[in-house]
Amino acid sequence: MGTGIFVIVLGVVNALLIKRLQFTYSKHFLLFSTLYTSSIFIVFWFVPELLQYANQWLGIVLFSTAALLFIYFNFLWGKHVDITTCYKYQEIPNHFKSILCLDARRGFAKVFEILLQQVCALFIIMGLIEIGLSVITTVLLFTGVVFALHITTPKWFGTVYGNYFLWVGTILAPLEVYFILEYSIGFYIASILHMAMYIVMYSMAYLLRDRG
């Protein structure tokens, strides 16, 4: 179910809303945020046991703080960065060039997208554990699922940014399992790390702008 929701929702967003209808997170942030939030509620509705991993006040506070900083980063980027100078900007397919066009509204919508992806990841990981698989087997299978789900990203976002999503997601997948299984706020730690990886990508795109 976690994989299915991820594929369906992100498929609709990328193939229909962004590529075909040319919607953007900045202009239609309420639509995207509502879609992601509704999808999160659907997961928790069908699997209420997952709420124990999200109902952590310390985690909520840390995640909320990180989300505000992430949104502020998006705001500063949109105010001060000329995206056409960013590293390999021209190699991004036209309908997805908006991944570097940041502002506070896009950051807001992105937070909910990240949260949905983390809820789906939580569902997959705990589902594998619940059926009796070992931690090592769970790590291997979850990493394989993450790789499979991101294997099309070079097509969607271009060679540089698509491969960033593919390989960073795959490399960090074992850490996600570790955080969730070892810490009561592991779900939120993994979510914060997810946001941080976007900031790393944006920062590299800016720092390497003269080589683009």
Image (cartoon, rainbow, N blue to C red):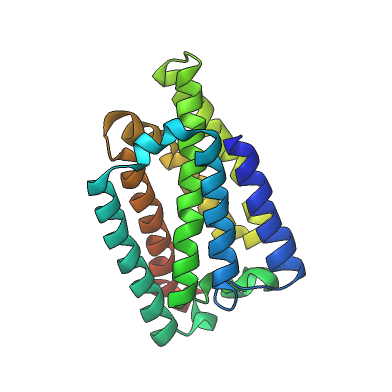
Q: How many marks?
A: 0
Front residue (pair 140, 164): 140
Tell me where residue 57 appears, x and y as whole percent: 25, 47
42 shown above or below 38: above
Horizontal side, residue 209 vs residue 181: left or right = right
Using the rendered image of the protein, determine whether residue 169 is visible from the camera's viewpoint. yes
Q: Quadrant of residue 19?
A: bottom right
Using the rendered image of the protein, determine whether residue 151 is visible from the camera's viewpoint. no
Residue most toward the left?
A: 58
Q: Quadrant of residue 202?
A: bottom left
Horizontal side, residue 185 vs residue 82: left or right = left
55 shown above or below 197: above
* Residue appearing at x 34%, y 74% in the figure: 72
* Residue appearing at x 35%, y 73% in the figure: 73
* Residue appearing at x 57%, y 39% in the figure: 147
* Residue appearing at x 38%, y 68% in the figure: 203
27 shown above or below 178: below
Tell me where residue 89 appears, x and y as whole percent: 57, 74
201 shown above or below 167: below
